[in-house]
C-alpha cells in the first residue's frame, strides 16, 4: 500500500517512528514524505526506500495566527495532491503523532471519495468549523453533514483532484488562518466513507482496545510520555 506522511524539521524524527511502524506491519509499503521546500527534510533523514516529495508552497500564516496549527506541514498534503495524483491512484495518509499497530489490509483499497473515521468531539461539519474557524459563514446544510478526523485518511486522488477538493480546502485554510481538519471537512462536505474507529484510535481519550492505528491527537504526545507511550517507544527503538 502507498502511505503519505507530512512533516517539517521539528517533527521529522517522530515521522521516522511512524515509518518504522508502517514497515513492521507492511514490508511492501511505499512511503512518501511531504516536506515544504523551505525545510531541510531530505531522504537521508529516513530509512532506505522512503520517498521525499518537496512541496513548493507559501503558507501565508503561522501558528501565531491560530494555536491549533501545530505545524504548517499539515497543509502540505493539500497542495501536494496534483503531484501525488500523477504517481498513484490512492494512498493512506497518517499524522506523525500516530503509529500503525496491526495489519491494515481491510483499508487497502481505493475508495469512491475518501475513507476516514467519524470525529468523536465535533460530530458535524458545522460544529467542527464553528470551533476551528469561527468566522466562517456556513450554509444550514452543514449542520447535517458528518465530520471526520483528518489524522488518518485513505485518499482517492482522482476524486480529490477532479473535484478540486484540495484547492477548496487550501483556500478555506488560508482565508480563515486555520488548520487542515476543518478545511478538509468544509471541502468534502460529508461525502466520505466512514471506517471503524480502530483505524484512528484516540489514545488520549479512550481505553486501549483492538486498535490498528494509535493516534495521540490533542495536547499530549507519545514523545512527551503520554498515555500508552511505551507502544510508541517500541517502534522508536527499531
Image (cartoon, grey):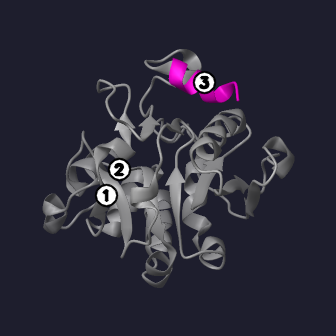
Q: Is residue 229 above or below residue 175?
A: above
Task: Work out how far the residue at label 2 is from the one at label 1, CA to CA, in angstroms.
Answer: 6 Å
Numbered disc 1: secondary structure: loop
Q: Residues within 10 Å of mark 1 (few under 14, many from 20)?
A: few
The quadrant in which the N terminus is found is bottom right
Where residue 190 sits: x, y (%)? 25, 65
- Earlier residue among tags 2 and 3: 2
Where residue 33 sits: x, y (%)? 68, 54
Q: Nearer the viewer, residue 58 or 193?
A: 193
Left or right relative to 213: residue 132: left
Where residue 57 sits: x, y (%)? 68, 63
Q: Is residue 151 magenta?
A: no
Quadrant hosting residue 184: bottom left
Residue shown at 60% from the left, 66% from the top: 79
Numbered disc 2: secondary structure: loop
Q: What numbered label is drawn on residue 232?
A: none
- Of circles 3 and 1, the one toward us is 3
In this figure, which residue is indicated by the disc labeled 3? 234
Q: What numbered label is drawn on residue 136?
A: 1
Please state the total of marks drawn on the protein image: 3
Left or right relative to 81: residue 40: right
Task: Work out how far the residue at label 2 is from the one at label 3, CA to CA, in angstroms.
Answer: 37 Å
Residue shown at 19% from the left, 67% from the top: 139
Residue 80 visible (yes or no): yes
User: Are dots 2 and 1 in contact, CB under 8 Å?
Assistant: yes
Q: Main secondary structure of the magenta part?
A: helix
Instruction: Point out the stretch of residues depicted in magenta.
Output: 230-238
User: Are dots 3 and 1 in contact, CB under 8 Å?
Assistant: no
Numbered disc 3: secondary structure: helix
Q: Residues within 10 Å of mark 3 (few under 14, many from 20)?
A: few
In this figure, which residue is indicated by the disc labeled 2? 133
Amino acid at each position: 500500500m502507498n502511505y503519505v506522511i507530512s512533516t517539517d524539521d521539528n517533527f521529522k524524527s517522530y515521522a521516522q517512528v511512524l515509518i518504522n511502524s508502517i514497515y513492521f506491519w507492511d514490508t511492501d509499503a511505499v512511503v512518501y514524505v511531504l516536506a515544504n521546500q523551505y525545510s531541510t527534510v531530505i531522504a537521508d533523514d529516513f530509512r532506505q526506500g522512503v520517498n521525499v516529495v518537496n512541496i513548493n508552497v507559501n503558507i501565508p500564516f503561522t501558528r501565531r495566527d491560530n494555536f491549533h496549527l501545530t505545524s504548517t506541514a499539515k497543509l502540505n498534503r493539500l497542495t501536494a495532491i496534483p503531484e501525488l495524483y500523477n504517481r498513484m491512484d490512492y494512498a493512506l495518509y497518517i499524522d506523525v503523532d500516530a503509529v500503525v499497530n496491526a495489519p491494515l489490509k481491510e483499508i487497502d483499497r481505493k475508495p469512491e471519495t475518501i475513507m476516514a473515521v467519524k470525529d468523536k468531539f465535533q460530530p458535524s461539519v458545522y460544529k467542527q468549523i464553528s470551533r476551528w474557524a469561527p468566522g466562517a459563514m456556513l450554509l444550514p446544510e452543514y449542520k447535517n453533514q458528518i465530520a471526520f478526523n483528518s489524522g488518518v485518511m485513505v485518499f482517492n486522488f482522482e476524486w480529490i483532484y477532479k473535484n478540486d477538493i484540495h484547492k477548496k480546502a487550501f483556500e478555506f485554510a488560508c482565508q480563515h488562518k486555520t488548520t487542515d481538519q476543518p478545511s478538509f471537512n468544509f471541502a468534502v462536505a460529508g461525502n466520505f466513507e466512514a471506517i471503524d474507529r480502530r483505524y484512528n484510535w484516540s489514545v488520549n481519550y479512550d481505553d486501549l482496545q483492538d486498535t490498528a492505528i494509535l493516534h495521540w491527537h490533542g495536547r499530549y504526545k507519545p514523545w512527551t510520555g503520554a498515555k500508552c507511550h511505551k507502544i510508541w517507544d517500541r517502534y522508536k527503538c527499531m
